[in-house]
Amino acid sequence: MEKTYFRKGFGLKSEIAGKLTADYHSAVVEALKSNGYNLQVGPLTFRLAREFGFCYGVDRAVEYAYETRTKFPDRRLFLVGEIIHNPHVNEKLRAMGITLLVHQQGDFDFSAVTPDDVVIMPAFGVTIRDFERLRSIGCVLVDTTCGSVLNVWKRVESYARDGYTAIIHGKHYHEETKATASQVMKYPEGRYLVVLDMSEARMICDFIEHGGDVAALHTHFGRAVSPSFEFQRDLTRVGLANQTTMLSGESLAIAEEVRKSIVRRYGPDCLEEHFRSFDTICSATQERQDAVMALLEEPLDIMVVVGGYNSSNTCHLAALVHQHGVPTYHIEDADAIDVRTGAIRHQPIGSKSEVTARPWLGESRIVGITAGASTPNNKVGETIARISAVAGVDLDGALG
């Protein structure tokens, strides 16, 4: 009988290495790294964060997708949503003949998938419901779920098993958080609540301590709680977790705020009975945030952050820089910088829509660069090349 579930790779790295290099390598980035993450280009100085771009989990997911195409050259390949939140990478997969499945009235549309097909599950993972639907079809499944995400799943599953409601710091509509929340529902009494930020966490803390308007909470958190959630019943024992790409400092602060409320409500001697917590921010996310903070210790005129607008970790990197007062431009791709007009298309911090700025580089001379964990090196290099062209300076000469 044919094996229909794969998670360990196909041992084809040598076969795909050349294509990966061609698709994602950057000589510009290599030059920066070899020069202490700095590059002088005429009057411009580029400073690159020491941790940026593809993390281990993304590397693995992309490699596995390329291996899958090589392993099954004659089979139809599908991908549940996007492999990662980067338009360039997902377009490369489409060009390889991989069809991206989309949502249909809230659920992914698997109607085109047959038992003869191969379906790749993304780095974010999929919900238990979607996994079971795919298994019932009988197709080959290639699971690229990130190990850091799996660690969060184990954590919230343990909460549900032991009768604790999982309070998840994340975006309830994000693929990863949906998949994480679904793990709780393995247990009949499993409960979850997703809080976006400290403001929402404080609403929950206030209810834990003082009670309040249940109807108002249901209205506010209607799409961010498990079915049949009851605030009075389900907030007496809670366990904290988070979407792996959120701001670590905020996740830790939210956990501490909830802990204090539990202590005030039940007393310090009962803390363990009512509260559990574990920092589930992935190390790569933390490293990229730390690298940005280190970069901010040096003088910067502007910062350019490269990565998908729907990439949570990229948006948080941009917000982190913005919070420290440095003019920040979050661009989705290098082509957001128009060399001919000198304009830049970017998404302002906190916004959900793209705007065009012209002029934007001005008299800036020290340019900070970083990229989200789903951004390939070639897009970072192209961004630096386009900024140099806008400034009218010779990047090729700087590279020697």
Image (tube, helix red, strand yellow):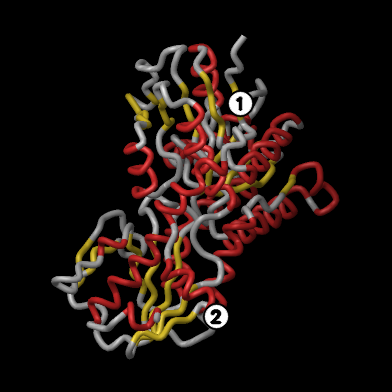
Disc marking residue 36: 2
Tag 2: amino acid: Gly
Q: Residues within 10 Å of mark 2 (few under 14, many from 20)?
A: few
Image x and y of residue 227, in percent: 52, 26
Q: Residue at x 73, y 35 (%)?
A: 158
Quarter the C terminus occupies: bottom left
Q: Is residue 295 above or below residue 93?
A: below
Comes first in the chain, label 2 or label 1: 2
Quarter the N terminus occupies: top right
Q: Residue furthest top?
A: 1
Tag 1: amino acid: Met
Image x and y of residue 41, in percent: 36, 84
Q: CA distance from mark 2 to mark 1?
A: 48 Å
Compare residues 87 and 322 and report the one nearer the observer. 87
Instruction: Give left or right: position of 20 versus 281.
Output: left
Image x and y of residue 252, in percent: 64, 59
How many marks the image carries: the answer is: 2
Residue for badge 1: 185
Instruction: Give left or right: position of 68 versus 343.
Output: right
Q: Nearer the viewer, mark 2 or mark 1?
A: 2
Circles 2 and 1, Cβ within 8 Å, touching? The answer is: no
Instruction: Give left or right: position of 8 versus 301.
Output: right
Q: Residue at x 46, y 53 (%)?
A: 21
Instruction: Give left or right: position of 263 versus 346.
Output: right
